[in-house]
Amino acid sequence: MSRLKVPMPRRPKLSKDGLLTFMSPSGYGLAALAGACRTPSCACRDILLTLFPIDFRVKSVAFAKGKLSFESEQLSALDREASISARIILETGELLLEPERTQHPEAEALLAPLRDALDGELLDDFSRLWRRLKGQPAVSDEFRRDADLGDWDRGNALAFGAVFEELRVDSYAHGGRVYETDELYCPSPECDCWDVTIAFIDPAGDSEDVGAATIDLEMGEVSFEHRTDDQGLVPGLWKRFVHRHRGVSRLHERRERMKEFGEGLFKRMDSARQALKVRPAFDQASSNVLPASVQAPRSALKIGRNERCPCGSGKKYKKCCLLRASP
């Protein structure tokens, strides 16, 4: 049994067995059961929600044997029959009402506070639940032991997803299109720069890389790179990125993780060069020689244009890192 007692959380809280509770400052909120399609072969990435409106009279919510129960001062006054059905798209963070399965007349109004509170941390929690329901292993915080860095050269930034396994592809629906993000960090422990770049990608577009936002985490300054005629697209996507992640603390934390990875990587690379007696004149040319723990087979380094990109994005190489590697 999962049980949450007063005070009800002012921000959405998801238990490991799928009980979601949320009480807005106005004294009205939702209790929900979260689930997902359990077919392992199904590629759907939706979280299914059955929500029940609650108010300040509810003292606690309990979940046992697949059913919700409420402890309330006036339980008979609660309309427990008018449930709300909705689904969350994990990548884009969209909370969509299922009207054909919803009878509550104020469903959209009740979903609005939850929709606004659906941040990156909660989406990650839902992604962990999704993996458990699908029978998939948990995502490790450690760097990928089989990381394939492809044509990466020392001195360039690295995509976070190329080094660490991610729970989901952080994406944003805008103007009828879905834009994915790629977070690029400097792994060099010797570099004291604080720049982090968020590249925005349109997988369905003719030119996938639509632009990027680069932030100096130390100074807080942001610059934009535009690769489309829409000069407001990248700033708008950046604004939504910051809103979803409640600021840039996520970038600070990930920068530290990338630096820790880089420190070990560079030491092993230097040891590998010394073992191979690589002369200094060829230092740059051999800078992508990786230690055995993170090096892919040599044949894997020759990536075909139509093969999956080694950064882990799931896209073809010609539509991912090949574009960023091209002059």
Image (cartoon, grey):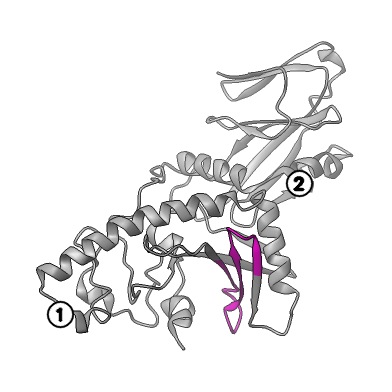
Q: Tell me: 10 left or right of 220.
A: right
- Of residues 278 and 131, the one nearer the viewer is 278
Which residue is pictured at 65% across the width and 74% down the height? Answer: 224
- Of residues 56 and 134, the one nearer the viewer is 56
Residue 143 in the image, given as x and y percentages of width and height? 35, 53
Q: What residue type is labelled 2?
A: Asp
* Mark 2: secondary structure: helix
Return the disc, 2 or 1, that comes first in the chain's sequence.
2
Which residue matches tag 2? Answer: 116
Which residue is pictured at 25% across the width and 82% down the height? Answer: 285
Image quadrant in which you'd find residue 205: bottom right
Circle number at residue 279: 1
Can residue 26 be seen here? The reply is yes
Task: Say which of marks 2 and 1 sits in front.
Answer: 1
Q: Tell me: 285 left or right of 54.
A: left
Can residue 36 be seen here? The reply is no
Image quadrant in which you'd find residue 5: top right
* Mark 1: secondary structure: loop
Give the position of the N terminus as an image quadrant.
top right
Numbered range of the magenta stretch = 197-222
Q: Tell me: 31 left or right of 269.
A: right
Q: Residues within 10 Å of mark 2 (few under 14, many from 20)?
A: few
Residue 109 in the image, given as x and y percentages of width and height? 86, 42
Q: Residues within 10 Å of mark 1 (few under 14, many from 20)?
A: few
Q: Which amino acid does label 1 sit on?
A: Arg
Residue 81 in the image, given as x and y percentages of width and height? 79, 27
Which residue is pictured at 46% across the width and 66% down the height? Answer: 313
